[in-house]
Amino acid sequence: MPNEPDDRNPEPDGPIETVILPRTSEIANGFTVRRALPSSRRRMVGPFIFLDQMGPEILRPGIGLDVAPHPHIGLSTVTYLFDGEAVHRDSLGVSQRILPGDVNWMTAGRGIAHSERTPPEMRRGGARMFGIQSWVALPAGDEEADPGFAHHEAGELPLIEGEGKRVRVIAGSLFGARSPVQTHSDLFYADALLDAGAVLPIAAEHEERAVYIVEGTIAVERQSGTFDGGRLLVLKPGETIALRAVTSARLMLLGGAAMDGPRHIWWNFVSSRRERIEQAKADWKAGRFGAVPGETEYISLPGDGPVVARYP
Protein backbone atom coordinates (compact mmCIF):
# COMPACT_ATOMS: atom_id res chain seq x y z
CA MET A 1 0.00 0.00 0.00
CA PRO A 2 1.53 3.39 -0.94
CA ASN A 3 2.38 5.93 1.74
CA GLU A 4 -0.23 8.63 2.19
CA PRO A 5 0.78 12.32 2.36
CA ASP A 6 0.64 14.10 5.70
CA ASP A 7 0.78 17.74 6.88
CA ARG A 8 3.07 17.12 9.81
CA ASN A 9 4.63 14.57 12.10
CA PRO A 10 3.12 14.85 15.60
CA GLU A 11 5.44 15.88 18.42
CA PRO A 12 6.77 12.78 20.21
CA ASP A 13 5.68 14.12 23.62
CA GLY A 14 2.18 15.12 22.51
CA PRO A 15 -1.01 13.03 22.82
CA ILE A 16 -1.26 12.19 19.10
CA GLU A 17 0.45 9.02 17.90
CA THR A 18 -0.27 9.31 14.15
CA VAL A 19 -1.98 11.69 11.73
CA ILE A 20 -3.49 10.04 8.64
CA LEU A 21 -4.54 12.01 5.57
CA PRO A 22 -6.96 9.70 3.69
CA ARG A 23 -6.42 8.73 0.10
CA THR A 24 -9.16 8.97 -2.53
CA SER A 25 -10.72 5.79 -3.89
CA GLU A 26 -13.52 5.18 -6.42
CA ILE A 27 -16.21 2.73 -5.30
CA ALA A 28 -18.92 2.93 -8.00
CA ASN A 29 -19.73 4.85 -11.20
CA GLY A 30 -17.30 7.69 -10.52
CA PHE A 31 -18.41 8.04 -6.87
CA THR A 32 -15.27 8.65 -4.81
CA VAL A 33 -14.57 8.33 -1.10
CA ARG A 34 -11.84 9.37 1.32
CA ARG A 35 -10.33 6.20 2.80
CA ALA A 36 -8.64 6.64 6.19
CA LEU A 37 -8.38 2.97 7.19
CA PRO A 38 -6.60 0.74 6.45
CA SER A 39 -3.46 2.85 6.05
CA SER A 40 0.25 2.18 5.84
CA ARG A 41 0.50 4.27 9.01
CA ARG A 42 -2.13 2.29 10.91
CA ARG A 43 -4.05 -0.84 9.90
CA MET A 44 -6.67 -0.79 12.67
CA VAL A 45 -7.91 1.24 15.64
CA GLY A 46 -9.46 -1.16 18.13
CA PRO A 47 -11.67 -3.40 15.94
CA PHE A 48 -12.14 -0.71 13.26
CA ILE A 49 -10.36 -1.91 10.12
CA PHE A 50 -11.98 0.27 7.44
CA LEU A 51 -13.20 3.88 7.41
CA ASP A 52 -14.51 5.74 4.35
CA GLN A 53 -15.98 9.24 4.13
CA MET A 54 -18.66 9.39 1.42
CA GLY A 55 -19.26 12.92 0.09
CA PRO A 56 -20.52 15.50 0.71
CA GLU A 57 -21.63 15.16 -2.88
CA ILE A 58 -24.66 15.98 -5.00
CA LEU A 59 -25.00 13.45 -7.79
CA ARG A 60 -26.36 14.47 -11.18
CA PRO A 61 -30.12 14.13 -11.78
CA GLY A 62 -30.92 10.56 -12.76
CA ILE A 63 -27.69 9.29 -11.19
CA GLY A 64 -27.39 7.81 -7.72
CA LEU A 65 -25.17 5.68 -5.56
CA ASP A 66 -25.23 2.19 -7.06
CA VAL A 67 -23.15 -0.34 -5.17
CA ALA A 68 -24.31 -3.65 -6.65
CA PRO A 69 -24.41 -6.85 -4.55
CA HIS A 70 -21.01 -7.83 -3.19
CA PRO A 71 -19.84 -10.23 -0.44
CA HIS A 72 -18.34 -9.88 3.04
CA ILE A 73 -16.93 -12.25 5.66
CA GLY A 74 -15.43 -11.79 9.12
CA LEU A 75 -16.71 -8.29 9.89
CA SER A 76 -19.62 -6.01 10.62
CA THR A 77 -20.39 -3.11 8.27
CA VAL A 78 -21.74 0.15 9.66
CA THR A 79 -23.43 2.70 7.40
CA TYR A 80 -24.02 6.09 9.05
CA LEU A 81 -25.37 9.04 7.04
CA PHE A 82 -25.28 12.77 7.74
CA ASP A 83 -27.29 13.63 4.62
CA GLY A 84 -29.08 11.74 1.85
CA GLU A 85 -30.68 8.30 1.84
CA ALA A 86 -29.82 4.81 0.66
CA VAL A 87 -31.55 1.44 0.46
CA HIS A 88 -29.79 -1.62 1.87
CA ARG A 89 -30.68 -5.08 0.51
CA ASP A 90 -28.97 -8.31 1.51
CA SER A 91 -28.96 -12.06 0.93
CA LEU A 92 -30.94 -12.60 4.15
CA GLY A 93 -33.88 -10.90 2.44
CA VAL A 94 -33.58 -7.63 4.40
CA SER A 95 -34.57 -4.42 2.61
CA GLN A 96 -34.01 -1.32 4.75
CA ARG A 97 -34.00 2.40 3.97
CA ILE A 98 -31.06 4.19 5.60
CA LEU A 99 -31.80 7.72 6.89
CA PRO A 100 -29.44 10.28 8.47
CA GLY A 101 -28.62 9.44 12.08
CA ASP A 102 -29.81 5.83 11.83
CA VAL A 103 -27.50 2.88 12.45
CA ASN A 104 -27.45 -0.06 10.06
CA TRP A 105 -25.20 -2.75 11.53
CA MET A 106 -24.74 -5.76 9.27
CA THR A 107 -22.76 -8.69 10.62
CA ALA A 108 -21.24 -10.78 7.84
CA GLY A 109 -19.88 -13.59 9.98
CA ARG A 110 -19.39 -16.64 7.75
CA GLY A 111 -20.77 -14.78 4.73
CA ILE A 112 -23.36 -12.32 3.43
CA ALA A 113 -23.96 -10.32 0.24
CA HIS A 114 -25.58 -6.88 0.10
CA SER A 115 -26.18 -3.83 -2.06
CA GLU A 116 -26.61 -0.12 -1.30
CA ARG A 117 -28.41 2.16 -3.73
CA THR A 118 -30.04 5.57 -3.88
CA PRO A 119 -33.86 5.24 -3.72
CA PRO A 120 -35.47 5.72 -7.17
CA GLU A 121 -37.55 8.73 -6.11
CA MET A 122 -34.44 10.62 -4.94
CA ARG A 123 -32.58 10.33 -8.25
CA ARG A 124 -34.76 12.71 -10.24
CA GLY A 125 -33.55 15.98 -8.73
CA GLY A 126 -29.97 15.01 -7.95
CA ALA A 127 -29.30 12.77 -4.97
CA ARG A 128 -27.27 13.95 -1.97
CA MET A 129 -24.83 11.64 -0.22
CA PHE A 130 -22.75 12.38 2.88
CA GLY A 131 -21.75 9.87 5.50
CA ILE A 132 -19.30 7.33 6.87
CA GLN A 133 -18.92 3.67 5.97
CA SER A 134 -16.90 1.64 8.45
CA TRP A 135 -16.03 -2.01 9.02
CA VAL A 136 -15.54 -3.60 12.42
CA ALA A 137 -13.49 -6.80 12.46
CA LEU A 138 -14.99 -9.69 14.43
CA PRO A 139 -13.10 -11.50 17.20
CA ALA A 140 -11.60 -14.78 15.99
CA GLY A 141 -14.23 -16.79 17.85
CA ASP A 142 -17.06 -14.94 16.07
CA GLU A 143 -15.67 -14.80 12.53
CA GLU A 144 -17.90 -17.70 11.48
CA ALA A 145 -21.01 -16.46 13.31
CA ASP A 146 -24.40 -16.46 11.60
CA PRO A 147 -24.87 -13.38 9.40
CA GLY A 148 -27.36 -10.80 10.65
CA PHE A 149 -28.67 -7.27 10.25
CA ALA A 150 -29.84 -4.74 12.85
CA HIS A 151 -31.44 -1.35 12.23
CA HIS A 152 -31.71 1.35 14.91
CA GLU A 153 -33.38 4.70 14.26
CA ALA A 154 -31.61 7.87 15.36
CA GLY A 155 -34.06 8.39 18.22
CA GLU A 156 -33.01 5.09 19.83
CA LEU A 157 -29.41 6.22 20.31
CA PRO A 158 -28.13 8.08 23.39
CA LEU A 159 -27.66 11.81 22.82
CA ILE A 160 -25.41 13.84 25.11
CA GLU A 161 -25.89 17.62 24.86
CA GLY A 162 -24.57 20.72 26.59
CA GLU A 163 -21.81 23.33 26.59
CA GLY A 164 -21.74 23.57 22.80
CA LYS A 165 -21.54 19.79 22.28
CA ARG A 166 -23.99 17.28 20.81
CA VAL A 167 -22.73 13.70 20.86
CA ARG A 168 -24.71 10.71 19.54
CA VAL A 169 -23.37 7.34 20.72
CA ILE A 170 -23.65 5.07 17.67
CA ALA A 171 -22.30 1.90 19.26
CA GLY A 172 -20.61 0.83 22.47
CA SER A 173 -20.21 3.09 25.50
CA LEU A 174 -18.95 6.65 25.85
CA PHE A 175 -19.44 9.49 28.36
CA GLY A 176 -21.42 7.17 30.62
CA ALA A 177 -23.98 6.27 27.93
CA ARG A 178 -24.40 2.97 26.09
CA SER A 179 -25.89 2.42 22.63
CA PRO A 180 -28.49 -0.36 22.17
CA VAL A 181 -26.54 -1.65 19.15
CA GLN A 182 -25.23 -5.14 19.86
CA THR A 183 -21.52 -5.61 19.11
CA HIS A 184 -19.11 -8.55 19.35
CA SER A 185 -16.30 -6.65 21.08
CA ASP A 186 -15.58 -3.77 23.44
CA LEU A 187 -15.66 -0.60 21.33
CA PHE A 188 -16.98 2.93 21.04
CA TYR A 189 -18.28 4.86 18.05
CA ALA A 190 -19.88 8.31 18.19
CA ASP A 191 -20.88 11.31 16.07
CA ALA A 192 -19.92 14.62 17.74
CA LEU A 193 -21.07 18.09 16.67
CA LEU A 194 -19.14 20.96 18.31
CA ASP A 195 -19.80 24.68 18.29
CA ALA A 196 -16.77 26.92 17.83
CA GLY A 197 -14.93 27.12 21.15
CA ALA A 198 -16.46 23.96 22.63
CA VAL A 199 -14.12 21.56 24.44
CA LEU A 200 -14.58 17.79 24.24
CA PRO A 201 -12.67 15.52 26.64
CA ILE A 202 -11.68 12.04 25.43
CA ALA A 203 -11.22 9.71 28.40
CA ALA A 204 -8.61 6.96 28.60
CA GLU A 205 -11.20 4.23 29.31
CA HIS A 206 -10.67 2.57 25.91
CA GLU A 207 -7.35 1.03 24.93
CA GLU A 208 -7.16 2.38 21.37
CA ARG A 209 -8.77 5.65 20.25
CA ALA A 210 -9.00 7.86 17.18
CA VAL A 211 -10.78 11.00 16.04
CA TYR A 212 -11.82 11.46 12.43
CA ILE A 213 -12.44 15.13 11.54
CA VAL A 214 -15.36 15.17 9.12
CA GLU A 215 -15.68 18.95 8.90
CA GLY A 216 -14.19 22.00 10.60
CA THR A 217 -10.93 22.67 12.43
CA ILE A 218 -9.88 21.51 15.88
CA ALA A 219 -6.96 21.91 18.26
CA VAL A 220 -5.66 19.17 20.55
CA GLU A 221 -4.48 19.79 24.08
CA ARG A 222 -0.66 19.80 24.34
CA GLN A 223 -0.29 19.51 20.55
CA SER A 224 0.88 22.51 18.52
CA GLY A 225 -1.09 23.79 15.52
CA THR A 226 -4.57 22.87 14.37
CA PHE A 227 -6.10 20.03 12.37
CA ASP A 228 -8.57 20.43 9.51
CA GLY A 229 -11.32 18.22 8.12
CA GLY A 230 -10.39 14.99 6.36
CA ARG A 231 -7.81 13.78 8.89
CA LEU A 232 -7.72 10.80 11.21
CA LEU A 233 -5.93 11.49 14.49
CA VAL A 234 -4.81 8.31 16.26
CA LEU A 235 -4.35 9.04 19.97
CA LYS A 236 -1.79 7.58 22.33
CA PRO A 237 -3.27 5.27 24.96
CA GLY A 238 -3.56 5.80 28.66
CA GLU A 239 -4.43 9.46 29.21
CA THR A 240 -7.41 11.77 29.00
CA ILE A 241 -7.02 14.55 26.45
CA ALA A 242 -9.17 17.48 25.35
CA LEU A 243 -10.19 18.59 21.87
CA ARG A 244 -11.19 22.20 21.20
CA ALA A 245 -13.26 23.28 18.20
CA VAL A 246 -11.52 26.22 16.51
CA THR A 247 -14.51 26.45 14.15
CA SER A 248 -17.77 24.54 14.33
CA ALA A 249 -16.80 20.94 13.68
CA ARG A 250 -18.10 17.41 13.18
CA LEU A 251 -16.03 14.50 14.49
CA MET A 252 -16.33 10.73 14.53
CA LEU A 253 -14.92 9.20 17.71
CA LEU A 254 -13.92 5.55 17.44
CA GLY A 255 -11.85 2.76 18.90
CA GLY A 256 -11.91 0.04 21.54
CA ALA A 257 -9.90 -2.89 22.79
CA ALA A 258 -6.99 -4.03 20.60
CA MET A 259 -7.91 -6.98 18.41
CA ASP A 260 -7.00 -10.53 19.41
CA GLY A 261 -4.43 -10.77 16.63
CA PRO A 262 -3.69 -9.37 13.17
CA ARG A 263 -6.29 -9.39 10.41
CA HIS A 264 -5.88 -10.02 6.70
CA ILE A 265 -7.99 -7.89 4.39
CA TRP A 266 -8.55 -8.50 0.70
CA TRP A 267 -11.28 -6.66 -1.22
CA ASN A 268 -14.40 -7.05 0.98
CA PHE A 269 -13.10 -9.97 3.03
CA VAL A 270 -11.53 -9.81 6.50
CA SER A 271 -10.16 -12.81 8.39
CA SER A 272 -7.53 -13.91 10.87
CA ARG A 273 -6.69 -16.71 8.39
CA ARG A 274 -5.42 -16.22 4.84
CA GLU A 275 -6.87 -19.54 3.72
CA ARG A 276 -10.34 -18.38 4.79
CA ILE A 277 -10.11 -15.45 2.40
CA GLU A 278 -9.14 -17.82 -0.41
CA GLN A 279 -12.22 -19.89 0.38
CA ALA A 280 -14.41 -16.76 0.31
CA LYS A 281 -13.08 -15.89 -3.15
CA ALA A 282 -14.01 -19.35 -4.42
CA ASP A 283 -17.44 -19.19 -2.75
CA TRP A 284 -18.31 -15.83 -4.33
CA LYS A 285 -17.15 -16.97 -7.75
CA ALA A 286 -19.27 -20.12 -7.43
CA GLY A 287 -22.37 -18.25 -6.25
CA ARG A 288 -22.42 -19.81 -2.80
CA PHE A 289 -23.13 -16.56 -0.89
CA GLY A 290 -26.73 -16.45 -2.12
CA ALA A 291 -28.48 -13.87 -4.27
CA VAL A 292 -29.87 -10.56 -3.05
CA PRO A 293 -33.65 -10.48 -3.69
CA GLY A 294 -34.68 -7.70 -6.05
CA GLU A 295 -31.22 -7.41 -7.62
CA THR A 296 -30.24 -8.55 -11.12
CA GLU A 297 -26.50 -7.82 -11.02
CA TYR A 298 -23.46 -8.31 -8.81
CA ILE A 299 -19.85 -7.13 -8.47
CA SER A 300 -17.29 -9.62 -9.78
CA LEU A 301 -14.10 -10.55 -7.96
CA PRO A 302 -11.35 -8.04 -8.80
CA GLY A 303 -9.72 -9.02 -12.09
CA ASP A 304 -12.40 -11.60 -12.83
CA GLY A 305 -14.25 -10.22 -15.87
CA PRO A 306 -16.57 -7.17 -15.93
CA VAL A 307 -16.68 -5.23 -12.65
CA VAL A 308 -20.50 -5.43 -12.63
CA ALA A 309 -22.05 -8.57 -14.09
CA ARG A 310 -25.62 -9.80 -14.34
CA TYR A 311 -27.03 -12.85 -12.64
CA PRO A 312 -27.55 -15.76 -15.08
Image (cartoon, helix red, strand yellow):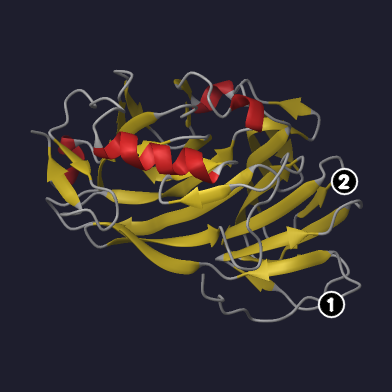
Q: Which mark is residue 11?
A: 1
Q: Residues within 10 Å of mark 2 (few under 14, many from 20)?
A: some
Query: Disc 2 on helix, strand or loop?
Result: loop
The amino acid type of the residue labelled 1 equals: Glu
Work out whether residue 49 or residue 155 is closer to the camera in this orientation and state it.
49
Give the percent coordinates (x, y) of residue 168. 63, 36
Query: Disc 1 on helix, strand or loop?
Result: loop
Q: Which residue is mark 2?
A: 204
Position of residue 212 relative to residue 143, above or below, is below
Q: Residues within 10 Å of mark 1 (few under 14, many from 20)?
A: few
Q: If you read the primary sequence from the N terminus, does the residue marked by circle 1 or circle 2 appear first?
A: 1
Position of residue 246 relative to residue 94, above or below, is below
Position of residue 138 relative to residue 51, above or below, is above
The amino acid type of the residue labelled 2 equals: Ala
Work out whether residue 118 or residue 312 is closer to the camera in this orientation and state it.
312
Work out whether residue 106 or residue 264 is closer to the camera in this orientation and state it.
264
Work out whether residue 261 or residue 112 is closer to the camera in this orientation and state it.
261
Rendered image quadrant of residue 84: top left
Q: Is residue 11 visible?
A: yes
The residue drawn where x is 73% and y is 39% is 260
Q: Which mark is residue 208?
A: none
Is 243 placed left or right of 151 in the picture?
Answer: right
In this view, the residue farthest toward the left is 312
Is 272 placed left or right of 118 in the picture?
Answer: right
Rendered image quadrant of residue 29: bottom left
Tell me the quarter of the image containing the C terminus. top left
Give the percent coordinates (x, y) of residue 183. 63, 26
